[in-house]
Image (tube, helix red, strand yellow):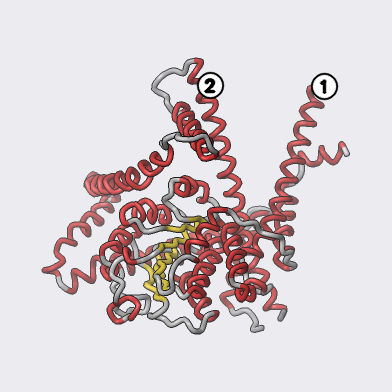
Amino acid sequence: MAPPHIGIWIAAFLTLACFTFLYKDNPFFRFAESLFAGVSLGYYVGIVLNQTLMPNLFEPMGENFGLNWDLVVPGLLGVLLFMRYVTKFGWVSRYALAIYVTYYIGVEFTRKLHGEVMPQLGRLIRPITSLDPATLVSSVYIAGVLSVLVYFFFSKEQDAVTKRISRLGIYFLMISFGAAFGFTVMGRVALLIGRLNFLILDWIYPTLGI
Amino acid sequence: MAGFFDRMLTLDRRWIFLFVFLSVAIPIIIPIGLPVTTTGSTRSAFEFIEALQEGDIVWISFDYGPSSAPENDPMAEAIMRQCALKKLRFVVDVLYPLGGLQLANNAIGKIAEEFPKLRYGVDYVNLGYKDGAAAVMRRLGEDIAGAFPTDVNGTPLAQIPMMQGLKSLRQVKLVFTAATGLIGEWWITQVHSQIGIPVIIGPTAVSAPKYYAFLNSGQLVGMLGGMKGAAEYEKLLRGRYPQMAKFYKTTRDFTATKGMDAQTVLHTIILMFILLGNYAYFRQRAKAARA
């Protein structure tokens, strides 16, 4: 087994530095935290520059401006966003922002409606043709969706009936939050497992020659 | 005993951290091999791929980064192993910007080593990373070469034998996305809804609950929820293909099945602390009420 290379040692040191926060705040943790934030930002800037701006904006315009002149418009919109840092012309950035917001509303609207709301409503609204376990499950879905909708209906003061229905909605919400929390714990533990696997299998074992 | 419960209420949380650390580290050093039970969503994903014919194309999207690699890596690797065993061809793309490409390259390298007969460009292709996930998906449905003019090595798609007949995502039999965040959802709400291609998702455990709605509405063929889902898939794979056991038996490599040992031990510890803490709290409250 080859001894771990310098990259493994650095990664192990930074992992341990992050773990030291569990004992108490200290300079090692602060160093690792700042380094991580800086490297992440630098990496992302590099990715955007090399993977987005270069191949989609600068290279096409440089190669054949006559054919790709229309790219000037999104390029300018991007530049306009940064005008918010110039006090006098800050208002100009709102135009670019307005176009982006409008674009995403258009894209998301169809995607949400066509890809999420309609198919799931379709699953909810099924004809009850027989009394079987599937019908029972469907009834639970219907009860859950309607009671949660009633809980979130704030336009009218609740009366004795809607109060009870919204109470049922709270139970459904609590169950879903509980399931989400359980999954979140599992997800976070998985990350810890990943880090300890790295420390033990990639760093400690090779260092000890195991 | 009363002193023990009083101490529980003022227990320094660093003791709990130590318990957590030990309950994860010990099963990694000494694997226990606790049993893993499979769920319907994982089984349906597995059986769907089993039902595909030799030569069919599966699209595998690496939509995650190092922050969720312990969960997503085993899923992606298990799916690629199944494709290799079934002689399915697979195309890999990366839509997650932060480190996704490195993870995809590592996983492909590992699978290529395990299956030396796999030929790049004939049995599998790595298209690399492309920015703008939603726009890329839309383009893939019309023209793959428009979204990815070259593969990860810079070779034009027209020169890659496997890609010569593959022009659109519509020709693919299945999309598998190992995903963190929103990108996985877009494969369902955009690609499946508009093109109709079956989608299997391998989300992180944090995202898994929301995908049950898509599963119930029939928009997903199957789901591998977090590390547990990956461990289930590994079990199904080992069960159907006994020759796979060698990849999952080693104590040196990380597998989701091994991770589930630590998950189980740690969850038991967490539950124990929750029960003890609550008992101590209610006990003290009852004592205060009596006083």
Q: Is residue A77 above or below residue A171?
A: below
Q: On the rendered structure, is B112 left or right of B261? A: left
- SS at badge 1: helix
Residue B277 locus on image (x, y percent): 75, 39
**Is the residue at mark 1 from the same chain as the one at mark 2?**
no
Residue for badge 2: A164
Q: Which mark is on residue B238?
A: none
Residue B246 locus on image (x, y percent): 64, 76
Q: Is residue B161 visible?
A: yes
* Residue located 57% across and 49% down the image: A184
- SS at badge 2: helix
Question: Which quarter of the rendered picture does the C terminus of chain B lie within?
Answer: top right
Which amino acid lies under the numbered mark 1 shown in the image of this protein?
A: Arg
Report in which chain the residue with disc 2 lies.
Answer: A
Residue A165 locus on image (x, y percent): 51, 24
Q: Is residue A42 visible?
A: no
Q: Which mark is on residue B290?
A: 1
* Residue located 47% across and 33% down the image: A142
Residue A114 locus on image (x, y percent): 32, 45
Q: On the rendered structure, is B188 left or right of A20? A: left
| Of marks 1 and 2, the one in the foreground | 2
User: Camera-side residue: A12 or A91?
Assistant: A12
Residues at circles 1 and 2 in contact by the CB criterion of under 8 Å: no
Which amino acid lies under the numbered mark 2 shown in the image of this protein?
A: Arg
